[in-house]
Amino acid sequence: MQVAVEVCVTSVAEAVAAQLAGADTVEICTWLACGGITPSSGLMDAVRTAVKIPARVLVRPTPDGFWYDPAALHALFLDAEIFGGGAIGLVTGGLTSAQAMDRELMRTVKELAPESELTFHRAMDHAADPQEVLAGCLALGVDRILTSGGANTALAGIDMLKLLVNTAGEHCLVAAAGRIGPENVVEIVERTGVQEVHFAAQKPTGARADKIALSSIHGAASFGFEPDMAKIEGVLNALMKAGLR
């Protein structure tokens, strides 16, 4: 069994580290602390220029949940159309006010970016019923789902992940996410049957705080990060030792 490994990246340095370590793909986003939002087109182009492995891009206009007002939807659709023009894989999604899958949103994105692989992201983990979201993805021809199984971590969501993998079959790829690391990746894969895992790999740079505060909320705190190569290599080595790569 060949388990694919995707690293979520917020910089060129993180993408290069993922490629050097042997990851299969990267997902480009920004502001990981909130779960990620849409990156700039400049960052996306810089990453795609720097690495040869395939890249996907997160299209999420706001950090506050997954129900979007008209202005946020306008931003989401415009970004999807622009990024989709380059045929890059899109990672997006949304929910209705009743916490069901926003099928119209996904249908519109599919129409705006017909050449892009389409992933429904972890909005699924905030839905009232993950199985309802999977049914919508199957009905719309969504290629991939990124989920922790509706739990805080993939390990805690193992039962739902297994159910989703079995229900989706070959029609939709289920990729596991949610605090995946060298210490648990093999257990998650073996107990669920997922064929792909997704995780971020960055660590604080330890840089000194700025002398002049750039934020009235966070003061002069440092927000610098660098790639965590050891984490990526640890996940890959664990999978290889288990015969999963």
Image: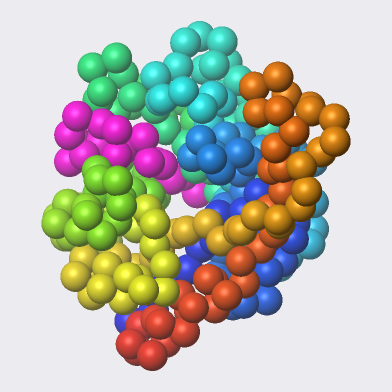
Where residue 242 sits: x, y (%)?
33, 87
What's the residue at 49%, 39% (across, down)? 35
Q: Is residue 149 above or below residue 120?
A: below
What's the residue at 79%, 62% (across, down)? 50
Q: Quadrant of residue 203?
A: bottom right
Position of the N terminus by quadrant: bottom left
In the image, taking residue 96 as reference, residue 49 lies left or right, namely right
What's the residue at 56%, 61% (across, down)? 201
Q: Per the image, is 141 magenta?
A: no
Residue range in magenta is 111-136
Q: Nearer the viewer, residue 20 or 118?
A: 20
What's the residue at 63%, 41% (across, down)? 30
In the image, taking residue 104 as reference, residue 200 lies left or right, namely right
Q: Per the image, is 116 magenta?
A: yes
Q: Is residue 210 above or below residue 88?
A: above
In the image, taking residue 110 as reference, residue 185 lies left or right, namely left
